[in-house]
Every structure is written in structure tokens, then in C-alpha cells.
Amino acid sequence: HLPPFASAPEVKEAQPLQIQVQIGDQAEAPRDREENTRQFIEQKRRALEANPNDAKACNDLAWTYLIAPDALRDWKAALPLAEKSAQLAPGPISRNTLGLAYYRAGRFREAAEILEPNLKDQVDWALAYDLYFLAMSHHQLGESALARDFYALAVRWSLAHQEALKPYLVELAAIQAEAAALLGVKDKEP
């Protein structure tokens, strides 16, 4: 069951999540993603050099470091950026990024504590992210039943909000896969 602070978002029945796959040289996709990520990191670094107090640039760069391909993932660089973004522009989006930074840093209790308020404040398209990260954080804390509840809710939320999630499907599918692997969830079960 969800903790008392977490009123379950209203979820309606929906069709399964669908992802469009582009046919092409599969070996090129990871290299392209890595190169695109490198370019985005450099773009955001330049933006921060020009304006060190740009909360959005801090948040975007932190997020990119946190979800980047393994070769570029860098929670140590992301954590101070996420903290600065949350200080400059407090709100659900910056809390989400800070929660993931805490998770990647192994600070699971802090991750859960920063993400939990988002269950009532987060925008629709971003709630699934909070739920998956809460699932992973609680799993790491040894709270398996709660972790599975958050995971199941994240899957149902994603299915019910496919239209709003369209721009994020690939990224969200990777996060769902990470959570499923950590929790030991099979493909067919929430």
C-alpha cells in the first residue's frame, strides 16, 4: 500500500505503451545518442558559463548527466547542479532531478524524501518519473512491497497518460527497464 502521504493519482484504463522503432543500423544508435548527449552537455555548460544562476540550465545539465549513457553518466557533476537548481527554482521538476541525483549518489532515503512531495504537486507528464525513482529508492532501502507498489502505479500512470508522455517515451522506457531490472519485475507484470 502507498504511504499515507501518497494519495494514489487517478488512473484510467488505457492501451499498452507503444514505442515507435526506427529501422537502421542498430550499431549507430548508441553512438548517435552518446554524441548527441555530449553536444547537449557542452551546450548547457556554455549556457551556465554565461549565466551561472540559470536554474533551468542547471537542472537540464544535471538531468542529462543523470540519465546519460553509462560512458557519460556523472552523478558527482550532477548533484551540485541539481541542488543549485532546486535552490534557485524550487518545485516539482527540480525536486525530481534532485531526487534522481540523490538516488544515483546512493542517498536513497533522501531521494525518497525529496520525491514524495511530488506525488501531489507534479505535472502529469512527469509523475511517472517520480514513481519509478521512488520505487527504486524504496527497493534500495529494503522496502520491497512499497517499491513494487510505486512501480505498479508508475506503469499504470504511464499507460493512462500516453498522449502527454509521447515526447518522453524512449527515455521513460529506459527508466522503466532500469526499475524493472532492479526490482526483478518480469515484462508482463507491473
Image (spheres, rainbow, N blue to C red):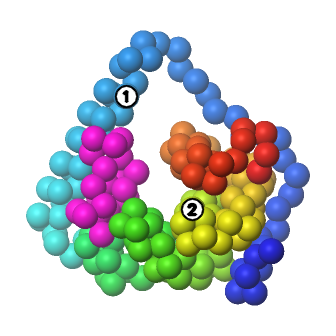
Q: Measured along the vertical axis of the image, is residue 53 above or below residue 158?
A: below
Task: Indicate which disc residue 122 carries.
Answer: none
Badge 1 density bin: few <14, some 14–19, many ≥20, Cα 10 Å? few
Picture coordinates of residue 128, whole percent (x, y): 63, 59
Q: Circle 2 sits in a helix, a strand or a loop, which is it?
A: helix
Q: Residue at x 58, y 24 (%)?
A: 21
Q: Quadrant of residue 157?
A: bottom right
Task: Indicate which disc residue 136 carries.
Answer: 2
Residue 152 visible here: yes
Identify residue for label 1.
Answer: 30
Q: Is residue 87 magenta?
A: no
Q: Quadrant of residue 38?
A: top left
| Dominant secondary structure, magenta | helix
Q: Residue furthest bottom?
A: 4
User: For the N terminus, which image quadrant?
Assistant: bottom right
Residue 168 visible here: no
Picture coordinates of residue 78, whole percent (x, y): 29, 64
Amino acid found under the numbered disc labelled 2: Met
Q: Measured along the vertical axis of the image, is residue 95 above or below residue 49?
A: below
Q: Nearer the viewer, mark 1 or mark 2?
A: 2
Is 31 situated left or right of 162 in this image? left
Q: Circle 1 sits in a helix, a strand or a loop, which is it?
A: helix
Q: Which residue range is magenta in the image?
A: 55-79
Q: Is residue 64 magenta?
A: yes
Picture coordinates of residue 146, whole percent (x, y): 71, 70
Along the line of sight, which residue is nearer the eye, 26 or 141? Answer: 141
Is 37 situated left or right of 92 in this image? left
- How far is the residue under mark 1 from the one under mark 2? 25 Å
Amino acid found under the numbered disc labelled 1: Pro
